[in-house]
Amino acid sequence: MLSGTTAFVTGASQGIGRTIAVELADEGANVALAARSDGIHETAAEIGDDERTLPVETDVTDEESVAAAIEATVDEFGGLDCLVNNAGIAGPTAPVEEVDVEGFERTMDVNVTGAFRCVKHAAPHLRASDRGSVVTISSISGKRPLENRTPYAASKMAVIGLTRTLAFELGEDDVTVNAVCPGATRGPRIDDVIEAQADQRDLSYEEAKREVFTDDTALGRLTEPEDVARTVVYLASEDARNVTAQDVNVDAGTVWY
């Protein structure tokens, strides 16, 4: 489905980012694995094809790091066709009056400005591609309230606005721009979030999981990382060339807007 294309995936060292990178590679893409940690090498080993992977240390809060990583990708593979903005942090879990400005700004810097930095430096290469695409991982928390998570919810709503605007800005060069909005997705990060919510609400882990996440879903369960990754693959493929400016929910039926 993606043979001959090159993707740059941030946050590719673990979790959803690693799963996305593996799915893209399985579909034939060359994949630059961008993150700050050594986990990018573990992701490359899981893919198991040195000729089609490029682990590249990248800090999305550092513009020079982002620019250098994207240029290294273009130098290695001869171009760039897909940018996946997946790097993100959960941010503080606390009532708004207990959230410090530093924590709020850090969350916005990684989740929003980090995506902006990547698009800024990827855009010339995506415009030059005949199948350019940007897929940014937002969240259903950018569409509905999430108590005690104001920095995260604000950042994920901002990502949706960024996506819609970029779709029109880059559309003149046939670059599609979409966001994927996962629900609570199985993995270590959601475990940490559930535990923090449990502490805030004086609940057990299972009670918090049900009350905050799964009870509100049509299917009554968490989302799987593979569900998110396959949606990203679709949005990067030729099958989705007329899909742009969209925020696609992958959430077991939590929101429908």
Image: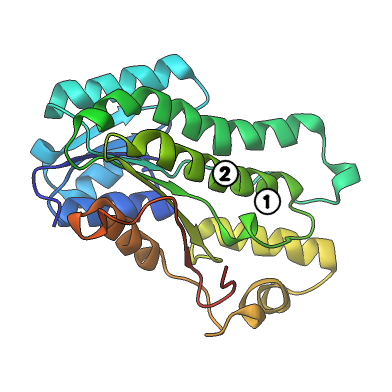
Residue depicted at x 38% and y 49% = 17
Left or right placement of residue 210 versus residue 94 in this view: left
Q: Amino acid at mark 2?
A: Gly
Can residue 38 be seen here? no
Residue 84: x and y in percent read 36, 43
Query: Given the current orientation, which residue lies at the most extreme top position?
Result: 64
Can you say whether 191 is above or below 219 in the image? above
Residue 188: x and y in percent read 52, 58
Q: From the image, which quarter does the N terminus lie in?
A: bottom left
Q: Amino acid at mark 1?
A: Ala
Which residue in the protein does label 1 denote? 153
Residue depicted at x 72% and y 78% = 207
Single out the mark in the foreground, 1 or 2.
Answer: 2
Residue 162: x and y in percent read 53, 39
Can you say whether 219 is above or below 100 in the image? below
For label 2, the SS is: helix
Mark earlier in primary sequence (1, 2): 1
Which residue in the protein does label 2 denote? 161
Query: Given the current orientation, which residue lies at the most extreme bottom position?
Result: 219
Label 1 CA crowd tier, 10 Å (few <14, some 14–19, many 20+): many
For label 1, the SS is: helix
Residue 86 occupies which quadrant of the picture?
top left
Q: From the image, which quarter does the C terminus lie in?
A: bottom right
Query: Given the current orientation, which residue lies at the most extreme front position?
Result: 172
For marks 1 and 2, give the CA distance. Answer: 13 Å
**Residue 188 or 27: which is nearer the viewer?**
27
Can residue 10 be seen here? yes
Residue depicted at x 67% and y 78% = 206
Left or right placement of residue 117 versus residue 145 in this view: left
Can you say whether 218 is above or below 85 in the image? below
